[in-house]
Image (tube, grey):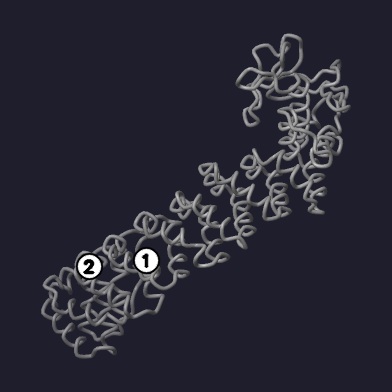
Amino acid sequence: MGYLLTSQPSIFSRGGINFTPPRLELPVPGLSSSRSGYPKLPGGCPELGLITSPDPDEGGCASPHGEAVVSPGFARHFVALWRAIEEEKNHEHLASSSSTVSSPEAPPILVEVVDRIVLGGEPLDQNLRWAACLAAMDPHASKHWKRLLECKDKCRVNNSLRAILSVVFRLAVDEVGHHLIRKLISACDETNLHVVVTEVVAHQKQLLETAKNALGVKWVQHLLQLAKPWPSLIRTLSFALFGGAADLMMDKYGSRLIKECLSRLSFEQNKFIYVAALANLRTVAKNELGCITLMKIVDHALGATKHELLAEIISHSTCLSQDLYGNYVVQHIFDLGEEKYEERLCWEVRSHLLQLCTQKNGSHVVEKCLASAGGRLLLEDLVSHKKLLQIAQDSYGNYVVNAALRLSKTAAPLLHQRLVEALRVHSQSLKHHPHGRHVYKNVAEGADYRSTSK
């Protein structure tokens, strides 16, 4: 536990601005004291590129390369004081403190830093860049900054971009900073958006990680929406997102970005999504979130692209039908109402009928096939299948047989009669079997063939 003491000189002096911390004796959690009694930040501020020097009395903070980038007071008092006070206030720890501290509305130095950057266009050194980052993440200074951008003055926008574009990903995931960075890109014209997009795509890995963040994904969505009128910008962003598109489809927040693109961008602009889905179809389809995203992708696909996606799903239908999540992707084909794909799927399923009928997820797919346009093909195979008894006695297969009895009764009476006769041959085996008896009842008693949940 360190203490913020009262005998400190002005902590920041540049351009005529001087700020002296108030007289405080506030214990600050997480701070240790140096030999002189001044508090120091353990490990510095790595997120801002700062580390504490070996001797806080000598240099305060230094960059990883060793040169002094901020004054000792700035590092010790400015960062520690305002962050600590805000933390203490939020957690109501000050109530138990011996002294009461009331934080002013905003750190005056941060507001002045914003004015110097946005209005004054002051040349940026390392000190001012770090101060700009802090200001962007401070609630009051950030609010002041957004007010300055409301007029969309080009000079102010340019000055703001120069100051914080290099830390755009850090701000995009910050609770305060993401509001400012969205406001900033909203004020950009085409030229400025080109600058932003160029900076963003130069750091593809960070872009993809940002898209997987609850706050960051909102900023990426906003950037894509703003870039929509300019095809070249969309192509550039699409190319950067393509490499991680499959991972985004399977991520909680990344999948939201994919769905947003499908809803807001044109078919041509979303080509990168369809290509990524086709290349990673099995992996995405077997994922809890990926299967939902993939179904959305199929719904939005057009022409040859949709045909390729459905053909790929059908070619892997045996594997996907047995998967906990993949079977929903296969069943989604029946929701499209296109008979040619239903028939192709039935042809694929009939070659693995026993395997799918006796598997929990696969049996659902077989039942859907029986009720589809190509169901008659499957019904004929089931009637003449040499393993019909095994299917009827299976814990999942008996549901398939009962579904076949129910559906064929009205749709194909002749096949229904053949199926009943094929099952009656095994009446005794079915009657005394824990699963087969359900089929036996429907055959022997002529009851309504109501499906039961598995």
Q: How far across and down, in percent of the image, does residue 193 sit?
A: 65, 52
Q: Residue at x 34, y 73 (%)?
A: 452
* Numbered mark located on residue 309 in the image: 1
Residue 9, numbered label: none
Dot 1 falls on a residue whose secondary structure is: helix
Proximity of marks 1 and 2: CB atoms separated by less than 8 Å: no
The answer to whether residue 271 is above or below residue 196 is below
Q: Could you tell me how far apart the alpha carbons at marks 1 and 2 are, in whole angstroms?
A: 41 Å
Q: Is residue 445 above or below residue 62?
A: below
On the picture, is 181 further left or further right than 97? left
- Label 1 crowd bin: few (<14), some (14–19), many (20+), radius 10 Å: many
Q: Which mark is residue 434?
A: 2
Q: Residue at x 80, y 23 (%)?
A: 26
Looking at this rendering, what residue extends furthest in the top direction?
A: 35
Nearer to us in this view, 431 or 400:
400
SS label for mark 2? loop
Residue 348: quadrant of the picture = bottom left
- Tag 1: residue type? Leu
| Front position in the image: 441 or 134 | 134
- Of 4 and 128, nearer the camera is 128
Residue 44 on image: x %, y %? 66, 23
Please name which of the two marks, 1 or 2, marks the residue nearer to the observer: 1
Q: The residue under label 2 is which amino acid type?
A: Pro
- Among numbered discs 1 and 2, the one appearing first in the sequence: 1
Q: Position of residue 68 (x, y in %)?
A: 70, 19
- In this rendering, would 202 be left or right of 150? left
**305 and 313: which is toward the camera:** 305
* Residue 399, image x, y percentages: 28, 72
